[in-house]
Structures are given as C-alpha cells and as structure tokens.
Image: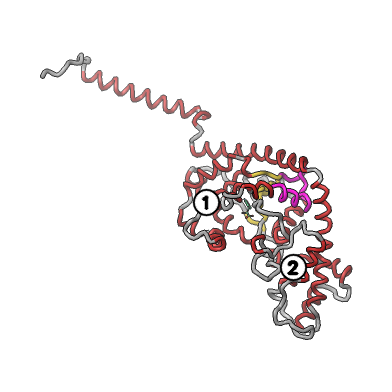
Amino acid sequence: MRKIILTGDRPTGRLHIGHYVGSLRRRVELQNTGGFDEINILVADAQALTDNADNPEKVRRNIVNVTLDYLAAGIDPAKSRIVIQSRIPELTELTFYYMNLVTVARLQRNPTVKTELTMRGFGSSIPVGFFCYPISQAADITAFKATTVPAGEDQEPMLEQTREIVRSFNHTYQCDVLVEPEILLPQNRASMRLPGIDGKEKMSKSLSNAIYLSDEPEDIRKKVMSMYTDPDHLRVEDPGRVEGNPVFIYLDAFAKPEHFAEFLPEYHDLNELKEHYRRGGLGDVKVKKFLNNVLQSTLEPIRTRRHEYEKDIAYVYDVLRKGTDEAEQEAAATLSEVKNAMKINYFDDKELILEQQKEFDEAAKERAAAQAAKGPRQPHRKKEQ
Ligand code: TRP
C-alpha cells in the first residue's frame, strides 16, 4: 500500500513553536528521510472559517503567513504539496455524504469539539459548520487516502472520528474505498503540547503567550526572560521543580547535546541541568539564558529563510496553486470512487441504464400479458348517468 501523509493547520495566524515541535518539525524530517510516497499539507482555510465566518480577511491574509512558515521551516514544494482546502470542492462534497454516517450525539462526545466549545464560549449558539468540522477533517484525510497524519495529541479525537467514518462507509457500501489513517504523535511528551510562556496549558495566539517562528531575536529573548517558572523557586539556593516548569518543558522539546557543548559546557546534558535545579543552587536566569540561546540558534535559520521567501510572494502563490491543482485531481479520483460505491454515479453507470431499462421493459411485458389474459381491450365508454 502507498504510504501517504496528510496534515494541516488552520490559517488564523503565524505558526508558533508549539506548532513546530508538535508537527511541523516532524513533517520536514519525514519529507527528507523519504519513506513516504506522498506528502500533502493542507492550509485549512475552510475549517478556519467555521469559527471565523465574520472575518474572512484574517483567514485570507494568514494563508500566506502559514505557507511562509512551512517553507521557512524546510517544507520543500518539490517533495511536499501545500494545498488550499477551500480550492478543493471535492472535500466539501465528501463531507456532505459523510454527514449521513455520523450522529449528533457522536459529535457532541468528540473531546476536541467539547473543549473548543467551552474555550470559545459558544454555549448553545454553536455554528453548525463548526460543530461538523470533525467530519470535514475526515474528508480532508480520506480524500487523499492518507495512511499517516503527523499531528499533536489534540488531534487524536479527530483521527478516531475519521476511522469510524471510514469503517462505517466501507461497511455501509460494502467496499474498501476509504483507508483508515493513523496518527503520528511527536517523539517526546514535551512536544505533544507545549505550554504558553505564561505556564498556561496551551500556547495560543488568543492567549498572547506564544513564541512565533517569525519572531525577531529581541522578541524571543524578552519572551524567554519573562517566562513563568516554578513559583516556589524564589532564591537561587532553593530547590526547584522541573515538572510542569515551562522553561524545562521547552528545553525537553528543543535542547540537543550540541547546544550544551556550545552554550553550557559545564553541563553534560539536560538531566544534569535538571538535577542541579532540583537540588537548588541553579538560578532561573541562567536556565533562561541557555533556553534563549537554544531557541535563537533553532529559529535563526528559519527566520532567515522566511525573509528570503517574503521577497517573492508571487512564488509562494505559485507553490500553492501547483500543490492545490495536483491535490484536486486526487480528491476527484477518490470522490468518484465514493460515488461509485454509493451508486450515485448516474451518468457513468452503464449498468444502471441497462438495469433500469430491463425493469421497465419487464413491467411493460407483464402489463401486456395481463391485458392479453383479460381478452381484447374494450373501447373506453362513458359512464351512463
Ligand atoms: N484541525 C487542525 C488544526 O486545528 C487542522 C486540520 C485541518 C488538519 N484538516 C486536517 C490536521 C487534517 C490534520 C489532518 O490545526
């Protein structure tokens, strides 16, 4: 079986380091180490509109920002397709057919929908489109027959929903058209869900607690130096907590052995640094300075590449157009198989014409036979009053 990747992001803002360690970094690795026949990365603008219906301008502007972040992080358009979701009407069509296979109760139980509903405070005024976005995400994934979805832990319920739709579809229509995807989670726990610089559980634009891939060096430094740490670690001598401490979580996600050799040679590795912090005698400022160096050296090449691509936005749109055109052909092929399986491919279904003609011919024959049995047809007479 072909190994196919599909993943994506909502274009509601520039991408931050949480996106990077959660999925983007992995996509670039998978792209460069091969092993996959196809990589599709979706700029999910239609999904972004499910809760930004009143702000298409925000979505529109961020399509380029997200694409620039992809290219800057190392996504190579010669190896991976970058695709605009709304330019593939087949995805919407698939969504509409899958909707018949999912109950309202099932969507209400989807944990991602549940938390996002409370986070966004929709209450009972949930837009139907937003409520249904797990189904549209299933369409994104299955349209490409994706086997693998590199994504953060928060996407797991979406994948479960997708697998259910695949099973239900294949079972209902007695076929094996759709493929069950697997999620590919980040390699370590820290990368699963990077907290915000304020220590809040999630890094997000709306909470203003994010470090962006495109942040300037001085912004990164300020953000790192202002980070929340262990609130009980008041003096350098105090023992500190490493668990749940965002500075150490970021180091878990970003620090490599080379970084110690380059910026903090008095420690061998992160474990040694953590031990010292736990024991006491290691100040936050020292750890933050190290983290700042690690982030600066990781983000510098990304930012530089971004600035290069920013000089040629027409090229960025060409990349999108090419990726989207190729992707549409695939989605169209899947949609056609889906319609075949559902037997709603009326014009391509030669058998349907023959079959229905036969039925009508037989009915006509039966009528004729019944008539013959009754004897010659009587001329129609008006009823006498
Ligand atoms: N829901 C994803 C996000 O919030 C974006 C997305 C849309 C996606 N379609 C997808 C992710 C398909 C993986 C697979 O960022």
Query: 276 left or right of 101?
Result: right
Which range is magenta? Answer: 63-81
Work out whether residue 326 can be spotted.
yes
- Please name the residue that numbered disc 1 is placed on: 132
Does the magenta segment cover residue 197? no
User: Is the residue marked 2 within 8 Å of ligand 1, measured from its CB?
Assistant: no
Work out whether residue 148 can be spotted.
no
Sequence-wise, the earlier of marks 1 and 2 is: 1
Are there few (<14), some (14-19), or many (20+) residues within 10 Å of tag 1? many
- Please name the residue that numbered disc 2 is placed on: 250
Residue nearer the viewer, 382 or 124: 124
Query: Residue at (75%, 52%) from the top-left corner?
Result: 69
Amino acid tagged 2: Tyr
Query: Residue at (77%, 56%) from the top-left corner?
Result: 214
The picture places residue 321, in percent across and down from the top left corner, at 71, 39
The picture places residue 104, in percent across and down from the top left corner, at 46, 54
Query: Residue at (45%, 57%) from the top-left corner?
Result: 105
Are there few (<14), some (14-19), or many (20+) residues within 10 Å of tag 2? many
The picture places residue 271, in percent across and down from the top left corner, at 78, 75
